[in-house]
Amino acid sequence: MKNEPAVVVLAAGAGSRYHGTRHKLSEKLGGDTVLVRTLRNAIASEMPVVLVISEGLVAEARGLVAPADMVVVDARSQAGWGMGDSIAAGVSIHSSASGWLVLPGDMPLVRPQSLRAVAAALDQQPIAFAQYRGRRGSPVGFAAELFSELMMLKGDEGARRLLARYPTAAVELDDPGVVFDIDTIDDLAVAQRRIDGSSSLRPESA
C-alpha cells in the first residue's frame, strides 16, 4: 500500500472569537456539525486522518476517527496549548507518513479533491498550500523531510517560520472553501446557504 500524506485536523482551539451559544465546531451545518463535516471531507480524500481535539469535543468525532488516531487535549493542558503544539502532536501520530496536510477543524467546505491536490504538490516542494483566486488558504502541506522541524513546533506561531524558510508551492484551486473558515455566526449562515445551494461563497467572507 502506498505511503501517503496524512490529514491533521486541528480542533483543540478555544474558538474564542466565535460568540454563539456553543463551541463553533459543535454548531449544526448541513445535517452534521461543523467539525463532523470537516472530518467527513478529510476522510473522503482517502488519506489517513489524524485529529487533535479538545476534551470537550471528543463526542463530536466518535465513530469517525479511531482513538489511536486522536490526540485529546485536556482542559488542564489547554491553557498553554497553541497551534504549534497541535501540529506537532498530530504529526507524531503518523510519523511515518510521506507528509502532512494541516487542516483547521473550522473549515468544513474544503473539498476532498482539494486536499489531494495539495498532497500531490508535495512531490515537487517541501511545503504546499491551497490558494483560491490568489488568496492563500488551507490546507497547508509539509513533506516528510520537515518531520524534525514540525515536531519542534510550540505555541501559537504555528508553522509560519517554516513557510518563511522553505520553498513553497501555491496550488491554485477552484474551491472557495479553502479560504473560508467559521469565525462568526454570519460565517455559519453563509456556509449553510452554500450547502443548501442558495448562494456562492463570497471571498470577502473568508
Image (cartoon, rainbow, N blue to C red):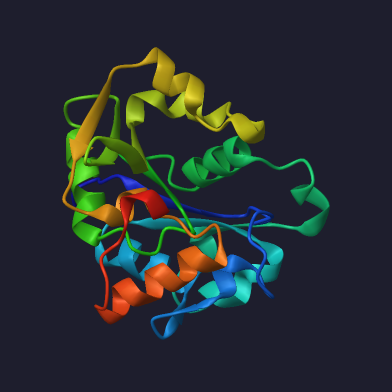
**74 left or right of 6 in image:** right
Out of 180 and 7, give the one closest to the viewer.
180
Out of 168 and 180, give the one closest to the viewer.
180
Residue at the spot x=17%, y=31% of the render?
123
Residue at the spot x=24%, y=78% of the render?
197
Q: Is residue 113 above or below residue 62?
A: above
Out of 100 and 14, give the one closest to the viewer.
14
**84 left or right of 121 in image:** right
Quarter occupied by residue 39: bottom left
- Residue 122 rendering spot, x and y as whole percentages: 23, 33
Q: Residue furthest bottom?
A: 31
Out of 170 and 185, give the one closest to the viewer.
185
Q: Is residue 124 above or below residue 204?
A: above
- Residue 154 rendering spot, x and y as whole percentages: 64, 31
- Residue 175 rendering spot, x and y as whole percentages: 22, 54
Q: Residue furthest right?
A: 76
> Can the viewer see residue 53 in this picture?
yes
Residue at the spot x=27%, y=54% of the render?
176
- Residue 169 rendering spot, x and y as whole percentages: 23, 27
Q: Is residue 174 above or below residue 32?
A: above
> Can the viewer see residue 206 in this picture?
no
Quarter occupied by residue 88: top right
**99 left or right of 157 in image:** left
